Image (tube, grey):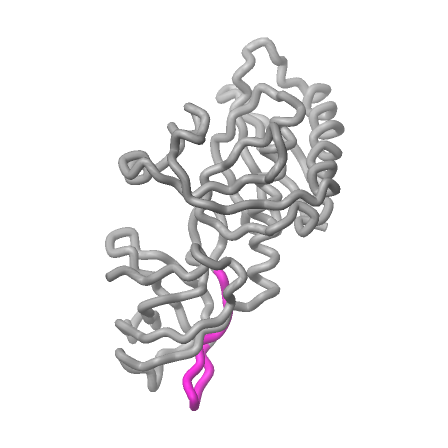
Amino acid sequence: MATELLYLKDMSLLAASAQITAIDPVAKTIILNRTPFYPQGGGQPSDRGTIKTPLSTFNVTAVKKSPTTGDVLHFLNSVDSLEPGQTVETEVDPETRSLHTRAHSAGHLLDHAVEDLALPFEVRSAYHFLPSPYVEYAIVDPSIDISPEYLKSLQATLEPAANAIVAEAMPVQVYNSSISELSEWRQKLLPEAVKQSGNVRLVKFDRSGLLPVPCSGTHVTNSEQIRPIRIKKISVDKEKRTIRVTYLLS
């Protein structure tokens, strides 16, 4: 049975007891039956933290999900004295989780600012790793000339539109639903397994006019927790007609 992902049920849960199901002494990894740690994926870096026994504390340096089994691999500084079947105490570093959560939610914030401004953009990819997270969009209106003047104007309007959503202090909901809630082009971006299941985990900034976004990451519970962002730069690939919006947290 794959590792139970506790953060999917409760993103505020940062500590939990768990049982070791497997150890790789060469890779210095362990697999647990359940974990509060977020494994790297979906454009979001993994959590950091500690795993403790009554006698020792082990640093969790990275967390990754096996693409074949669904098990979560916890990379440790050492696995000495650990044994399969042993019960351990897991604890996610709260500052790292908070930064990653704010950075990821800020990417969704830009998507919603695009919606508010009715810009002819479609999301193509996102990268929420600090210090330079970004969202990449395709410009679907062929009449737009992606000139330096256009990019300068875009930055001048997109940043305040995003921060206006922060100031609204609106609730952010995370829930499971049918993929039918998504627009057609959002559905196209989903992994095939999700399409086949017909269900998806959605993140929604709870205000009329903002569309839910499929996402498996961790998120703030209120838009004001993101705090004002700054757009560092907007770069362009004219051949692909895509723009990359790189942003900074405050």
Q: Position of 25 compared to 10: left or right?
A: left
Q: Is residue 147 magenta?
A: no
Is 79 located above or below residue 94 in the figure?
Answer: below
Residue 112 quadrant: top right
Residue 89 quadrant: bottom left
**Horizontal and vertical percent for residue 212?**
51, 35
**Horizontal and vertical percent for residue 187?**
39, 29
Is 44 located above or below residue 74 in the figure?
Answer: above
Highlighted range, magenta: 47-58
What residue occupies the far top of the structure in this picture? 143
Residue at 57% across, 53% down: 101
Give whichever of 156, 146 is nearer the camera.
Answer: 156
**Horizontal and vertical percent for residue 60?**
45, 70
Q: Position of 89 compared to 244: left or right?
A: left
Q: Is residue 52 magenta?
A: yes
Residue 118 quadrant: top right
What residue occupies the far bottom of the structure in this picture? 55
**Horizontal and vertical percent for residue 240?**
49, 22
Residue at 49% across, 71% down: 15
Give whichever of 134, 110 is nearer the camera.
Answer: 110
Residue at 60% across, 49% down: 103
Residue at 59% across, 40% down: 205
Which corner quadrant holds the N terminus? Answer: bottom left
Is 224 located above or below residue 11 in the figure?
Answer: above
Give whichever of 4, 248 is nearer the camera.
Answer: 4
Mark count: 0
